[in-house]
Image (cartoon, rainbow, N blue to C red):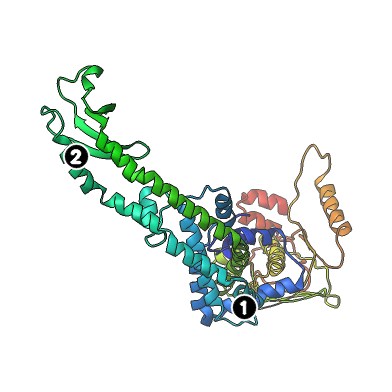
């Protein structure tokens, strides 16, 4: 489905990815279900009213934060949750609660509003509150892993308290360790390395060349790194037994909290899927109402009959590209005639008129308002067009035969509920001023010479054609 200067481009003002995806499905699958269309129309009509613009802006602002819920839940079920996933889920749930609270202040006689008010259950608020209380987003981003806020788990708080006071404590330990080292060693420090534990680190002396020179009585050599030697001493071993692997223990405990939080969210995931479906529908309908308000559309009257009545109808795209657009009406019924033959010179607007009628009917069948002053549209089950001939040597048919085959397809695959659009051959004329206004009757004059002149053909060639 294209964007830009297209029907999709002017209607798709969706704020979330799933709204755009659902609108695409509506474009690919227009419906004749009057109940569905009425459901959509009442929402579009509500938000098209200027006095409801504040609610529209508030809801669209919240819809921007709705994330890919199925992907988030799938990551949780596989325990592949990242910090960004928790952020996305929290924003989604919090925004869903804001949407529910806003919608509850709107008329509950509108079916979609009622479903959102009831379907966005208190489970959403529970999930949002739980994530806010447990997840330390600032710390998680700094460490690039899941971290827990204070006062969630006393054991984790105690581990972190020890980690925070570890620097000063290890400085005191290093000072006492230096007293028992060779006087040639000017300084030392005690460091903590996750998964390895506590080590005594001393600078490498000039006399320490070979590995045998690294041996120090009472110390177990571990490794050399950046001109510093690292050892285990009796005191560092005691620290390992006393404090353990603080970092890894804390990480494991926080992972257990995350797993428990994931389980809680997954147990209440049904409400999240409902958020996705209803939010996408709301997003689509607010996008359609935004277009209706911006471009001056009107709500069509839909019914199960064979009439199509359009008053002062406009082409939804050409009116945006042309400094002046002439509107035209369209009447089709059993009494007013259901087959229309349109004649006129080239560039007089026949194709635009035909496409205009087809696009308006199409827009009505997705629930959108339409570019017309008034519109009454009978539900059709197909729109067949024949705007140009596509020739091919491999087909082995003349252009005329190709046209006849297309007409045959229209007549054999359609019935009384189908809209036919056929482009009649234009009659050309003499010194033309295009008014682009549809009139009853037929074009009785040939304007071929003037059309050829407007097209830039040499005057001598035009004169020969006239003769």
Q: Work out whether residue 35 or residue 334 is closer to the camera in this orientation and state it.
A: 35
* Residues at marks 1 and 2, CA–CA distance in whole angstroms: 75 Å
**Which quarter of the figure is the N terminus placed in?**
bottom right
Q: Closer to the N terminus: mark 1 or mark 2?
A: 1
> Relative to 115, is 150 above or below?
above
Crowding at mark 1 (Cα within 10 Å: few <14, some 14-19, many 20+): some
48 relative to 396 in the view: left or right:
left
Please tell me the numbered disc located at residue 174.
2
| 1 and 2 marks in contact (CB < 8 Å) | no
Q: Work out whether residue 65 or residue 271 is closer to the camera in this orientation and state it.
A: 271
> Relative to 371, is 88 above or below?
above
- Residue 29: image quadrant is bottom right
- Residue 150: image quadrant is bottom left
Crowding at mark 2 (Cα within 10 Å: few <14, some 14-19, many 20+): some
Q: Residue at x 71, y 72 (%)?
A: 37
Query: Which residue corresponds to mark 1?
Result: 45
């Amino acid at each position: 489905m294209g964007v830009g200067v297209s029907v999709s481009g002017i209607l798709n003002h969706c704020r979330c990815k799933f709204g755009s995806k659902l609108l695409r499905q509506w474009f690919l699958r227009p419906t004749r279900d009057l109940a569905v269309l009425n459901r959509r129309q009442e929402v579009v009509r509500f938000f098209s009213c200027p006095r409801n613009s504040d609610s529209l802006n508030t809801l669209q602002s919240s819809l921007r934060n709705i994330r890919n819920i199925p992907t988030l839940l799938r990551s949780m079920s596989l325990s592949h949750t990242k910090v960004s996933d928790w952020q996305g889920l929290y924003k989604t749930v919090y925004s869903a609660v804001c949407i529910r609270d806003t919608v509850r202040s709107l008329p509950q006689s509108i079916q979609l509003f009622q479903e959102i008010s009831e379907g966005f259950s208190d489970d959403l608020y529970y999930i949002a509150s739980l994530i806010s209380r447990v997840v330390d987003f600032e710390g998680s981003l700094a460490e690039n892993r899941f971290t827990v806020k204070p006062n969630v788990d006393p054991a984790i708080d105690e581990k972190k308290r020890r980690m925070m006071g570890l620097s000063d404590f290890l400085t005191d330990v290093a000072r006492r360790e230096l007293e028992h080292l060779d006087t040639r060693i000017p300084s030392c420090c005690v460091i903590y390395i996750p998964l390895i534990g506590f080590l005594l680190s001393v600078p490498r002396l000039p006399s320490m060349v070979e590995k045998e020179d690294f041996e120090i009585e009472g110390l177990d050599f571990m490794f050399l790194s950046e001109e510093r030697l690292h050892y285990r001493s009796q005191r560092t071993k005691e620290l390992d037994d006393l404090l353990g692997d603080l970092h890894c223990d804390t990480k494991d405990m926080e992972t257990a909290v995350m797993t428990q939080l994931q389980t809680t969210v997954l147990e209440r995931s049904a409400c999240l899927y409902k958020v996705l479906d209803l939010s996408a529908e709301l997003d689509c309908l607010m996008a359609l109402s935004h277009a209706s308000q911006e471009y001056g559309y009107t709500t069509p009257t839909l019914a199960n009959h064979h009439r199509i009545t359009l008053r002062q109808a406009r082409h939804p795209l050409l009116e945006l590209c042309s400094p002046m657009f002439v509107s035209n009406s369209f009447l089709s019924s059993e009494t007013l005639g259901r087959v229309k033959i349109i004649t006129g010179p080239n560039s007089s607007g026949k194709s635009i008129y035909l496409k205009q009628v087809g696009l308006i009917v199409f827009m009505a069948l997705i629930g959108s308002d339409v570019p017309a002053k008034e519109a009454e549209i009978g539900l059709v089950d197909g729109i067949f067009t024949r705007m140009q001939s596509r020739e091919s040597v491999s087909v082995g048919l003349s252009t005329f035969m190709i046209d006849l085959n297309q007409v045959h397809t229209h007549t054999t695959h359609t019935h009384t509920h189908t809209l036919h659009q056929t482009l009649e051959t234009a009659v050309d004329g003499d010194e033309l001023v295009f008014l682009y206004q549809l009139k009853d009757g037929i074009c009785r004059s040939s304007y071929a010479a003037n059309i050829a002149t407007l097209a830039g053909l040499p005057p001598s060639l035009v004169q020969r054609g006239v003769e």
